Amino acid sequence: MAAPIRIANCSGFYGDRLSAAAEMVEGGPIDVLTGDWLAELTMLILARSRARHPGAGYARSFLTQMEQVMGPCLDKGIKVVSNAGGLDPRNLAEELHELAGRLGLTAHVAYVAGDDLLERLDDLQAAGRGLRHFETGEALARGDFVSANAYLGCFGIVDALAGGADIVVTGRVTDAAIVCGPAAWHHSWARDDFDRLAGAVVAGHVIECGAQVTGGNYSFFDEVPGMTHVGFPWVEVAEDGSSVVGKHEGTGGEVSIGTVTSQLLYEIGSQRYYGPDVTARFDSIELDQLGPDRVRISGVRGEAPPATLKVAMNRLGGFRQDITIALTGLDIEAKAALVEAAFWDASPVPREAIASVHSRLVRTDKVDPLSNEEAVALWRLTLKDPDEHRVGRSVADAAVAIALTSVPGFFSLSGPPGPARAFGVYVPATIDADLVPQYVTSLGGPTRVVDSVAPPGPSEVTIEEPARRASPSGPTRRVALGQLVGARSGDKGGHANLGVFARRDDVYDWLEGFLSVEQLRELLPEASALRIERVRLPRLRALNFLIHDLLEEGVAASSRQDAQAKGLGEWLRARLVEVPEVLL
């Protein structure tokens, strides 16, 4: 039996802390260095980069990190696996080869491709096997999509490592694949070792967002030491698929059941976490605190994955203009109504001629304000249209033209009027897995083909549910919900997920009975008319809610101030509710 493999993370998104790679390589022993660069929005950003500069659709910050750590990684035998290849993994691999040469190093670099379907869309549709919308099943034509990338699994990475690669870069693989791949390679797992693979997928999900599992974005941050410079995480994956989450000694932050639970709830849907290699059952996860900054993950069960792969697609949605006007002091509602009427009177384009108009009054003002800022509310207007000129500078000028002819206390927070901005729309799709093989290429060597079709296996495993306990009752007190529970929220395309967790059994027993879908609608009026799904995860003392269409057409198109729903959970925690005093 092989010893556990320690896999570290040095990036949770494109723009994360550049020094993290060196910190992980130099701060303690690791076997593999990984990093995640590819959020759904990032794929759109990279598509725009590639359109301006062909071949440049990859994360350049990864090259900066590799210049810092390539030598130490090769000296210590540390493998590097990253999805920073984005839309151009081959070009990134070649850049890494050139970088090694400039540094006087010899590195075996490999890349995994096959995920990019953009140029295949018409042929697939003509053959009757085109892409379909992930939720509606509607056939998707080539249209004006600028990217279309299937989420590949981990076995292309396994093949590259088995071929002797020191550095493996990929295009769009699942976030967890960059951890699952090294674990499956190290332990020689078969493709139908679904429980082991599921355990590694959970481990990958836990560290994919970097310091979010070591105290970053944690509801109870005030209990965590060293928050000014939080250490990045690693995970030790054992042969049976169980793992231990930790961080290097002496670094900021913490690894606790709370921080791990919080990250487990990030951007999930149901208790089934679907992937190309395995479906991991999140309702089977067991967590144990082994000691300071060490949490064991065990008991994870896996089911066979779907016969289809998810595809992340981005198309050009048109153009948008965002206008924000400050309204000060008294009579805010009346001021907002007059400003809106005056704006449309001054606009050269009538309201009914614009494809999408979203007007919102944000009441940030306070009663008896102690500062000018506390007296201000915001009128926010988002205009979208396929025609750039219809929502262009002339429309933005209308907000300036009424500045001296409208309400007292009016001033603009939009900056100087400017042209409309292009925006993208995220579209999730599916494609049959047999149509998307993985192509593994070692620079200077042959290209190998790895099938994306998983072997058959159980489509459903039985997870024994913990016995339910009575909910605490008795006299209540009105307090902020966040005094008792933590939360983690994020985007899932146009939907938002909101995970809520307790740190004690009695608090969870109350939470489960209290926080129904109907109660959530009352606490978050913005979601009151939307479809909401609730999932129980009693082993994690958690509930997860999927709020459909809260983010409209996705992050790049959303008119919400918090376009990625990052603050949704903290908004919920700030709401006042009646809580049994026995829990306080």
Image: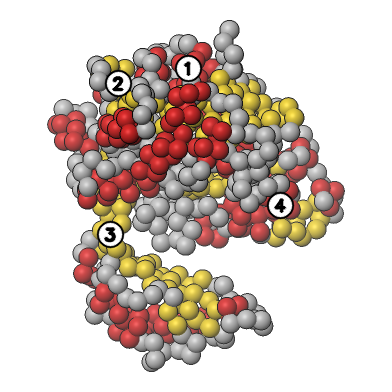
Residue topped by disc 4? 222
- For label 3, the residue is 422
**Residue at horizontal 36%, vertical 29%?**
104
Q: How far apart are marks 4 and 3 (CA)?
A: 40 Å
Q: Which amino acid does label 3 sit on?
A: Ala
Q: In which quarter of the image is the N terminus?
A: top right
Q: Measured from the top left, where is residue 307 in percent x and y?
A: 36, 22
Q: Which of marks 3 and 2 is in front?
A: 2
Which residue ends up furthest to the bottom in the rendered image? 405
Q: Which of marks 2 and 1 is nearer the N terminus?
A: 1
Secondary structure type for disc 2: strand
Q: Three-letter amino acid code at disc 1?
A: Ala
Question: Callout 2, which amino acid?
Answer: Ser
- Residue 555 in percent (x, y) is at 40, 52
Circles 3, 1 touching at the beta carbon (< 8 Å): no
N-terminal-most mark, 4 or 2? 4
> Looking at the image, which is closer to me, 212 or 437?
212
Amino acid under disc 4? Asp
What residue sits right under mark 1 in the picture? 184
Q: How far apart are marks 4 and 2 (CA)?
A: 47 Å
